[in-house]
Image (cartoon, coloured by chain):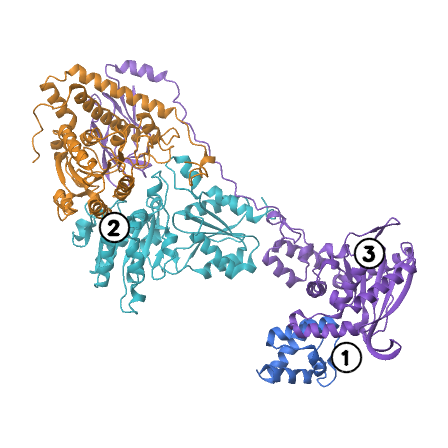
Chain colours: A cyan, B blue, C purple, D orange
Amino acid sequence: MTVISYREAMRQALREALSRDQRVFLMGEDVGKYGGTYAVSKGLLEEFGPERIRDTPLSELGFVGAGIGAALGGTRPIVEVMTVNFSLLALDQIVNSAALMRHMSGGQFSVPLVIRMATGAGRQIAAQHSHSLEGWYAHVPGIKVLAPATIEDARGMLWPALADPDPVIIFEHAQLYNLEGECPDAVRVDIASAAVRRAGTQVSLITYGGSLPKAMDAAAQLAAQGVEAEVIDLRVLRPLDTDAIVASVRKTRRAVVVDEGWRTGSLAAEVMARIMEDAFYDLDAPVARVCTEEVPIPYAKHMEEAALPQAGKIVAAAREICGKNLTG
Amino acid sequence: MTNGEIRNIVLAVLKGIAPEIEEGELLPDRPLRDQVDLDSMDWLNFLVALHERLAVDIPEADYRKLTTLDTLIDYLVQKHV
Amino acid sequence: MIEFKLPSLGADMDKGKLLEWRVKPGDRVKRGDIVAVVDTSKVAVDVEIWNDGTVHELIAEPGVTIEVGTVIATLLEPGETSEAAEAARRTRPAPAAVPVQAEPAVIAAATAPAPVGERRRVSPVARRRAVEMGVDAEAVAGTGPHGSVTSEDVERAAAAAKAAPPAAAADRQGQMRRAIAAAMSRSKREIPHYYLSERIALQNATLWLQAENARRPVTERVLMAALFLKAIALACEKYPDMNGLCRDGTFAPAASVHVGVAISLRQGGLIAPAIHDVQQKSLTQLMQDLTDLVKRARAGSLRSSEMSDPTITVTNLGDQGVESVFGVIYPPQAALVGFGRVAEQACVVDGGLRIIPAVMASLAADHRVSDGHRGALFLAEIHRLLQQPETL
Amino acid sequence: MIAPPPSGPVPFPRDFALRLLADMVRIRRLEEKCAKLYGEGKIRGFLHLYIGEEAVATGAVRAFEAEDNVVATYREHGHALLRGVSMGSIMAEMYGKQEGCSRGRGGSMHLFDAQARFFGGNAIVGGGLPLAVGLALADHMSKTRRVTACFFGEGAMAEGAFHEAMNLAALWKLPVLFCCENNLYAMGTALARSESQTDLCAKAAAFNVPTLKVDGMDVVAVHEAATKAHGHVNGGEGPVFIEFQTYRFRAHSMFDAELYRDKSEVEEWKTRGPIHTYSARLKAQGMLIEEQFLEIDRAANEEVEQAVAFAEAGTWEPVEDLLRDVHTPAGAP
């Protein structure tokens, strides 16, 4: 057990994958000489050489498509698209090639590709650099979508993702890179199930990725007010672990879904729909959600904070659906 | 649908309207409405429920064929096929 | 004296580790010179200084991690002496407080509008638990959002009920009996009843009903009871003194005809909830209302308004096989119409003896409000209406 | 090796020649102040400085007419300033104050000004090129004589948007002036590691578009080329592509350790600094004396201090306005 950063955990995962499997290579903007925009791949160029740590020009559609082709060609590429904001340029390749290939080809071709992207807002980088579009990708059949929110998941998810014969997209929230925590030496995690990060009995806070720390903070504040909140870290955004969601809601009978996406058509909306479908008769109150206000993320700090989900908003939403019958 | 299956449905529907009855005590060959307290509203609800469960339309003219449980079930088996 | 603070070197940088100084006290520096190297969480970066001056004191030690904005060195302004600087330091006013931005107002989650309509807000699990625990969810005080009833509320109510004497369930039965007894005794005490009866031929009605039902699916089949209801309502419009409420001895005719339908409960007891505005409703609508009313009455989930405002009551004991029934008026109403068994009877029609379906209709009315003569006309009107079923 | 700095007489009237110098100095002082303010936490998020490339914006924008359109990138402070966006509103925008030219919502990368027909910075590499083609298409269809100039770095030439925009503009002979600011590094990737064809003009010529290659450190050469190209485009002859070869003296943005280039290269390019080489020529030609330069520099610093004061005095947008302007209110223009 050592204390490392989320960034360091992801770097160790990359190094392990590159060392254990010669087919694995990393491709993306400034992943080599520059060491990665978020410094995740720092030092890898020196260790594995330019053939397997490939800097690309600013051609997202081009090199993501190339990653798909290379996967078809028998390699195990890890493509780093700097942030989800730039992945919009590669959306056509991801949706119309990577996701559809296996089904369209009648099961002949599978695309063992891993795409990593930073995501999310915070730090005043303004509207075009602050999107949180995990929900878009989680809408598409044919790909798996992961959101490591802990040091252990950052360290452990890459290897099973590479082993998966189908495309896997890993979203790394930009505000998590500086997160530090303990990481067990040998990490084995699955990429199929949600996790209970904090057990509770009176309301379920269901969230993922960068919003997990805010949900944990809210749960602590609620506990101080006599409300025992359970925190569910979805971990996998497609396919959603509906059983885990429903099991928690059956226990607590109330749920708040926290999602940095915009409300309309969000991942939160999908989680709420599944709760309504499978746990309707277990609900003591309508499911609430805390999402980003429906506005392009503003630059000014106080406006950005007002737009984004915050622990305070989560606590307020939880209190609202708990009504008066809880102490405190 | 076999005769037995239809019997079960009829009894289930009947219990839905008159929960207090015990199937075991019902005499299949004796007039049903003498053994079970069914007013005209209950009787109509009973037929509507059978219609919904078995997709069988029972015109008023046929009421006289349905006096006992057995005749009712025979009628339904023959109509349902 | 110039305070040189650790600058922010990146969007996601809150602290940095000083690696080395590139200057020493006494060195002259000018704008843009590199004075130190700081390791951000990602990379070592040269740190510039934006002032001309002379390095006075290096405060931060290499190898230490410090917050952005911490003073790491001091400089002398060009031409400033160190003594003057020291003196100035002691009298320097407290640094201006950093303007704390107002805590962003939490945009209040829009509260749902007050519940519309009278259906109580009971959560799904509360409804389920209520059925499981034999609790009437509608009668439980709600502590959930917007006063809604939650499963905790139901569980609390059930526990409270359990704590009550075990006869509680039977008690409900007794309660109803006591309520009926009270109403009936008050009726007999206060209302001078007079009774009339009339045999009504139902040949037209029966034939019309058979033809009508032959054309309708079973789900829209019409019972004779619906014809009776409509006939009463239309007759009430002609004789308003039969349809209204007596309050403190004075009778007020009702604006509309809400007919209380006497429904016997399977486990015993009787209630007479109302079907509203019968005079405006079609036979199909009346049948739907009647079916719904009976189902909810027997399930115990009647709305309070349905219990409290019938303007006249009808009792239809024909199903139980009696030829005629003379009821007791439900106070504060002023009349009650009874129907016996519909059956083949021998009647004189146009001078000849005919066997036709017929029913004995009866009226119990409040003599303070109307006289027998009015009652008779009222019954005759019902008789006349039932001869033209197609107009109902 | 880099070519020696330009020499020879400055072929412009004296006051226009000094106007170009003053503009470059204003940009330089503004950008230096931004670097300082970023260190103090007054400016946050991403900040991309233009120090070293001042000649391109100055020489080019001074060749445009007032009603021309300009579409820029996130390295846009110089272009915005010269298109007439006040330094105060630029500084306030970087403070996030609502007196900023984008109400404090855009920050350094998203400066907008409708009056100055400045259609903004764009943080998506190559994102502005298709927009410029569209603006030109609208003018083309309404027979409005106007040039739309778009600025972009050589990194954008690897984006699909560049190829698709160039083709459309050339195909439909649209009045677009493509200004490529080739500063040799796309963020951390040198040109040779980004482009198979490093002769950018050859690449652009493939679209059957006239091209110019210009020393981006020489404001005279920049202005002459931009004037010529502007005439061509404004004459309805279709788009022109200019490659301005320039160099940024500072990091790509505010947390880049510049591992991808060595200090000696930066120092070497500093000898070609656009301001000191130009002022030397003016002095040699007797158009400028040191006192005048110091006066120009003093005026620039004064303008910067006033801009900072304006921004410091600025106010925060009320949180209640968060959702304002997501859509255009009914009846608004």
On screen, residue D287 above or below D133: above
Query: Which residue, given by chain and number where applicable, does mark 2 sit on?
Result: A60
Say the numbered circle drawn on residue A161. Answer: none
Q: Amino acid at mark 2?
A: Glu
- The quarter holding residue C335 reads bottom right
Q: Position of residue A307 (x, y in %)?
A: 43, 41
**Distance Cα–Cα, label 1 vs label 3:** 36 Å
Q: Position of residue C174 (x, y in %)?
A: 80, 62
Q: Position of residue C7 (x, y in %)?
A: 29, 31
Do the residues indicated by labels 1 and 3 lie within the same chain of the protein? no
Q: Position of residue A268 (x, y in %)?
A: 45, 52
Q: Amino acid at mark 3?
A: Asn
Query: Which residue, given by chain and number where applicable, does mark 1 sit on?
Result: B34
Could you tell me which residue is drawn at 25 percent across and 32 percent down?
Answer: D79
Chain letter of the residue carrying label 1: B
Do the residues indicated by labels 2 and 1 lie within the same chain of the protein? no
Using the rendered image of the protein, determine whether residue A230 is visible from the camera's viewpoint. Answer: yes
Chain letter of the residue carrying label 3: C
**Distance Cα–Cα, label 3 vs label 2:** 81 Å
Say the numbered circle drawn on residue C243. Answer: 3
On screen, residue A327 above or below B52: above
Compared across the picture, whether A148 is left or right of D150 comes to right
Compared across the picture, whether C318 is left or right of D122 comes to right
SS at circle 3: loop
Q: Of residues A283 and D278, which is closer to you in this image? A: D278
SS at circle 1: helix
Evaluate if marks 1 and 3 touch, with contact meaning CB atoms under 8 Å apart: no
Evaluate if marks 3 and 2 touch, with contact meaning CB atoms under 8 Å apart: no
Query: Pointer 1: residues within 10 angstroms few (<14), some, or many (20+)?
Result: few
SS at circle 2: helix
Could you tell me which residue is drawn at 24 percent across and 18 percent down?
Answer: D298
